[in-house]
Image: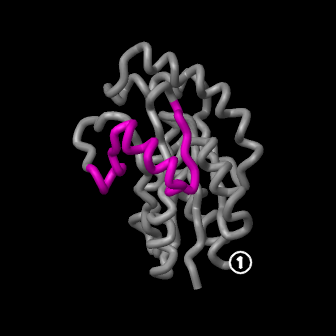
């Protein structure tokens, strides 16, 4: 029986990646669906582990060949997407797939897989807290932080398209809520 799918989406800086990494350490038979992107590597990111890093031209060629389950040009010239082959590989091993994707990608995956997927939206407690988190990362310029903060308002409008919304005010509480959500979905 193919594995189930768990979609985690959120505005950048909401803590979804931290929550996903925590869940991967738990006993849910989860395997991370590594997204593809055309953006440059940040810090110590590793190709094939954090993302499948592609040039914009390589990304566009895969779009033309219909190799993506979903994809989006998030910022001009900056693509993100989920390779169909990645999801099939994990599910065919009987493992559950966990996604860390933007909100548009998350809603598209949910539409494709319907009841086989649980879509969870991670939300920061406030826009001010989101800005603080982005600044404390020390990975983005003030201009990029301003873009991401503005995009937050747009992305927040998608939260009602998700099965569950978790407000990440206290990380430990968000961990517990995410674990309970996965357990309940697996027990269906």
Give the residue displayed 66% in from the left and 51% down from the top.
108
Secondary structure under the numbered disc 1 in the rendered image? loop
Return the x and y of residue 20 as percentages of the image width and height: 46, 55
Return the x and y of residue 14 as percentages of the image width and height: 52, 37
Relative to 26, is 138 on the left or the right?
left
Q: Quadrant of the N terminus?
A: bottom right
Q: Is residue 63 inside the magenta stretch? A: yes
One can see residue 26 in this view: yes
Of residue 2 and residue 18, the one placed in the foreground of this image is: 2
Give the residue displayed 45% in from the left and 50% down from the top.
62
Tell me which corner region of the image, top left, top right, bottom left or bottom right, holds residue 59: top left
Return the x and y of residue 182 as percentages of the image width and height: 60, 66
Give the residue displayed 47% in from the left and 42% down from the top.
80
One can see residue 28 in this view: no
Residue denoted by label 1: 188
Give the residue displayed 30% in from the left and 55% down from the top.
48
Q: Is residue 181 above or below residue 43?
A: below
In the picture as drawn, the residue positioned furthest to the right comes out as 160
The segment highlighted magenta reads: 47-74
In the picture as drawn, the residue positioned furthest to the left comes out as 44
Q: Quadrant of the C terminus?
A: bottom right
Return the x and y of residue 154 as percentages of the image width and height: 67, 28
Q: Is residue 150 above or below residue 45?
A: above
Relative to 142, is 7 on the left or the right?
right
């Amino acid at each position: 029986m193919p594995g189930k799918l768990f979609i985690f989406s959120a505005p950048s800086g909401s803590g979804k990646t931290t929550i996903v990494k925590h869940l991967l350490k738990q006993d849910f038979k989860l395997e991370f669906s590594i997204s593809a992107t055309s953006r440059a590597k940040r810090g110590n990111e590793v190709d094939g582990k954090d993302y499948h890093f592609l040039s914009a031209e390589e990304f566009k060629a895969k779009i033309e060949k219909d190799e993506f389950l979903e994809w989006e040009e998030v910022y001009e010239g900056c693509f993100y997407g989920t390779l169909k082959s990645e999801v099939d590989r994990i599910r065919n091993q009987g493992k559950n797939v966990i996604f860390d994707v933007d909100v548009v990608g998350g809603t598209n995956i949910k539409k494709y897989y319907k009841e086989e997927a649980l879509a969870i939206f991670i939300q920061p407690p406030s826009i001010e807290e989101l800005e603080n988190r982005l600044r404390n990362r020390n990975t983005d310029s003030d201009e990029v932080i301003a873009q991401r903060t503005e995009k937050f308002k747009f992305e927040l409008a998608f939260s009602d398209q998700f099965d569950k919304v978790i407000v990440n005010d206290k990380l430990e509480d968000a961990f517990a809520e995410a674990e309970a959500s996965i357990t309940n979905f697996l027990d269906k």
